[in-house]
Amino acid sequence: MKNRPEERVRLRIIEALLLAGWSRHRISTEEAIGKLADSKMRTDIICYNQQFNPQILVECKAEYISLSNNTAEQVARYNQNVGAPFLLLTNGVADFWYEVKNEGVKSLEQQPELLDNKSPSPDYEYVDWQKRGFAGSEAAPALRKWLGELLPALWHSQNSSAIQFLSFSQRLSDLDLSHYYILQGISDHERLAFSILTTAFGGSRLVAILNENSHNKAVLVVNLDLLFDSQAQNATIYSGAGMHAVDGSEVVESLTSDTAKTAEQLYELIAETIG
């Protein structure tokens, strides 16, 4: 799938369906519906049962799109050709479930019982974080162990509204900044976004972006590979004043699942450097 907002939502929903107990062999995407095989009407996701009867029709929208009656009418119209008893309308932040019964559609307070309502958080191994771009393939054993403990604490305990995918047109050398970030307010006019990303060559980087009045003011990049190799100059702050080499070991050592505290420490390191 291409790296588009609605595709990212679709992948997240598919993973949630798998965690809720649905077989990956009973999930289809991009099915043409309608009387013609080349119909422009295509479903986002259909979940089938063991007999390959459709059970859930899912319509995915980008996170920034508000879900409305028009969107609900679209998925209901698609379902006239699918015939699933349950419908899910989602933008990755809000989920709306519906049940089709006696040719009527009613909203549900929670996902239907055919899914596991008590599904656990993902139990990722290091390679799973690596495939998702959060952990580098060339990380040393100590760094792998640290990332394996920190990443679940950061990402699996968060309110989804505090997590956003941010897109950037510019790169920092071999680092593509476009990724999922945890967003934290610092003051009325300042926000900080931070994440752990991978480079094209298997490196691991902690990135923090300071935004002031809707403008990106500074970017902190901590080279975790250098830091875990005990090298003092392991981080760089990019700003309008130029590039500043710093030591990020103190702030990295104190990283926890407390995102407000983590953001504050990252902010202090940036502020102390650029003023």
Image: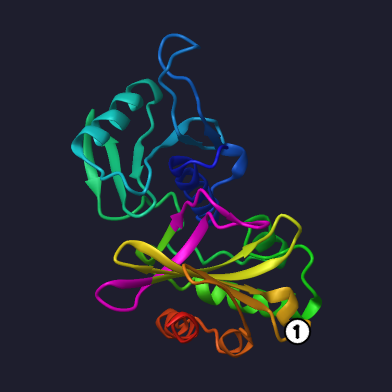
Q: Is 229 included in the stretch rendered in magenta?
A: no
How is the protein colored in the picture? rainbow
- Residue beneath the point at 24% across and 30% down: 73
Say which of 266 and 81 sits in front. Answer: 266
Q: How many marks?
A: 1
What stretch of residues is rendered in magenta?
165-191
Direction from residue 59 to residue 245 in the image, left or right: right
Q: Amino acid at mark 1?
A: Gln
Residue drawn at x 78%, y 82% as measured from the top left: 229
| Residue 169 on the magenta segment | yes
Quarter residue 138 falls in: bottom right
Q: Indicate the position of residue 271 as horizontal and vertical percent values.
A: 44, 83
Residue 125 or residue 209, whichever sits in front:
209
Q: Say which residue appears at 47% left-offset and 43% top-offset.
A: 10
Locate the N terminus and report the quarter of the image it occupies.
Answer: top right
Image location of residue 143, percent across then percent down: 73, 77
Residue at left 74%, top 82%? 228
Placement of 186 over or under 16, stated as above or below? below
Q: Which residue is mark 1?
A: 231
- Residue 19 lies in what quarter of the image? bottom right
| In this rendering, position of residue 191 left or right of residue 5 | left
Closest to the observer, 118 or 46: 46
Q: Nearer the viewer, residue 114 or 175?
A: 175
Helix, strand or loop at label 1? It is loop
Counting from the top left corner in percent of width and height, residue 270 is at 48, 80
Task: Name above or below for residue 157 compared with residue 13.
Answer: below
